[in-house]
Image: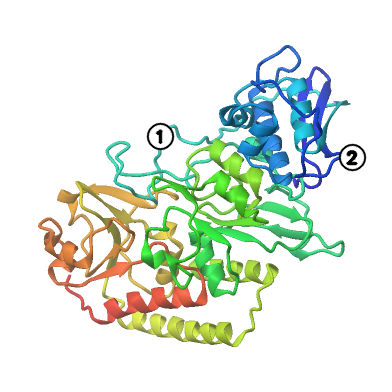
Amino acid sequence: MTYHGDRRLMTATNQHRIRYQMRDRNEHTLGTTPPPDATLDHDPITPTDDLHLEEDELRDLSAAIVATRVKARLTRRQVADAMETNYRSISRLESGTHQPSIRSLQRFARITGTRLRVSFEDVPVPQPTQSAAPTKGFPSMPNDPRTFTTWRASRRTLLGAAAGAAATSSLLGRAAAQDATPNASPAADVPANGIQPDGTWVFTDDRGVTVILPKQPERIFADLSAAAPLWDFGIRPIAVSGWTTTTDVAWGNADRSLEDITISPDLGSPDPEKLIALQPDIYVNITWSKGDPNDVWGFSDIETYETINGIVPIVCIAATGFADENMLRFAELAGLLGADLETPEILAARETYEAAVASFSALATEKADVSSLFGYVMDGAEWYAATQADWADLAWFARLGLNIVDVPGEPGDFWETLSTEQAVTYPADVFFNSARAGTLSLEELAASPTFQQHPAVAAGQIGSWNQDFIMSYQGLTEALNGIAATIAASTRIL
């Protein structure tokens, strides 16, 4: 399904559906001083008998309220002042957890220069089915092993992102969109990517989610994992957020002075209020599950995702599969966002990249008997061995001929969790440790009493691995050259 045009929110009642719709009022310009009668009781979300919505319907309604406020270019504080209430009441109104009255919604509409429309329409009667397919939900406890902090949720020091566990497809299908910049939603029959004859802009991302905007987006916001490759392809994001903004190598060539609006050190999503102030046209991110419309990096719960997706539509490029193929998708997106992919700088970067690929492949063939292990070792009781197939860079290195130790696991595991006493579980000739902030430096790794038992560490054949690999010509060239330099200086010891 593809959303476009006005956001419409519906609730089923018997054989009919009530439609709530915020529409512009011709007699009142958005963002200007509201009419004198646009006031509200001190509690705008007092439950009444006027309106009783189900949980999913409340979520849709709250998302439309956020989108309407954003379009009116009003902050929560401004709306609260105009309604003569407090900031917390507006936060509750937008939370999707409290029942508002129709009267409250009408007054909110006046404040935002819109009109609330209510109508009825027939809906099909649901047919019973024999069984329902299992669905995935956001975890109640963070558990995504691709991101680490010092916070210990269980026996693993893992802080979750939405990348590994997501909400059901039907839930995200109802996620909110800006009234003028429609939401990303799964779609089967959609136009080709790019600017359409009517001037609209279309992009179907690697989740199978399609975004249709009134025009080519100009103000690009991005997770750093997407901002870094976009920067190399000529796109200049207005700001960034993400789990990796504290990791130096994750920035690549992107300007470190870019505003970072990550909501907190323990959460990878952007601050909603700061995002609203930026007025972005689109939010570019990555997904760790290609083809899964529910998988977006950097979100720890569905509520946060829906809040942000209600402010700006999100598109994602895959970070799994093969890194070189994903790089081409970033190049495609950058071109559709207006980048010139034939500049001398990009052409030179491509030539350098192609030479690095050829050199890496030749070296991997020459050193085919030298095995490599990739891991994540920090100062703690556990460490993590990377499963090759889950990481797009490792899968690509292997395809180019690099001999990588096979760490068994199910698709999507990304790591095997091991105690430090199991440092020699996977012997290898070379050990690459993640360069993510919080991991041991190569000097610290070499001095670790437990890891000194590992053959590669004992032989001094260790190197750094940027697990936040940057999917651009420059980023992948650096990744190839870094691994190649360590391999070239290593020999078979097993």
Q: Residue furthest front?
A: 36
Q: If the image is split into quadrants, where does the C terminus sit?
A: bottom left
Q: Position of residue 100 (x, y in %)?
A: 69, 22
Q: Quadrant of residue 250?
A: bottom left
Label 1 or label 2, whichever comes before in sequence order: 2
Tag on residue 27?
2
SS at badge 2 = loop
- Up/down of 195 relative to 363, above or below: above
Q: Quadrant of residue 370?
A: bottom left
Q: Residue furthest left?
A: 449
Asked if disc 1 and disc 2 are in contact, CB closer than 8 Å, the reply is no
Q: Residue at x 27, y 75 (%)?
A: 369
Tag in front: 1 or 2: 2
Q: Quadrant of residue 178?
A: top right
Nearer to me, 238 or 217: 238
Q: Which residue is mark 1?
A: 141
Nearer to me, 223 or 86: 86
The amino acid pointed to by label 2 is Glu
Report whether 167 appears left or right of 253: right
Q: Gap between marks 1 and 2, in whole Å?
A: 49 Å
Q: Residue at x 41, y 76 (%)?
A: 478
- Up/down of 173 relative to 129, above or below: below
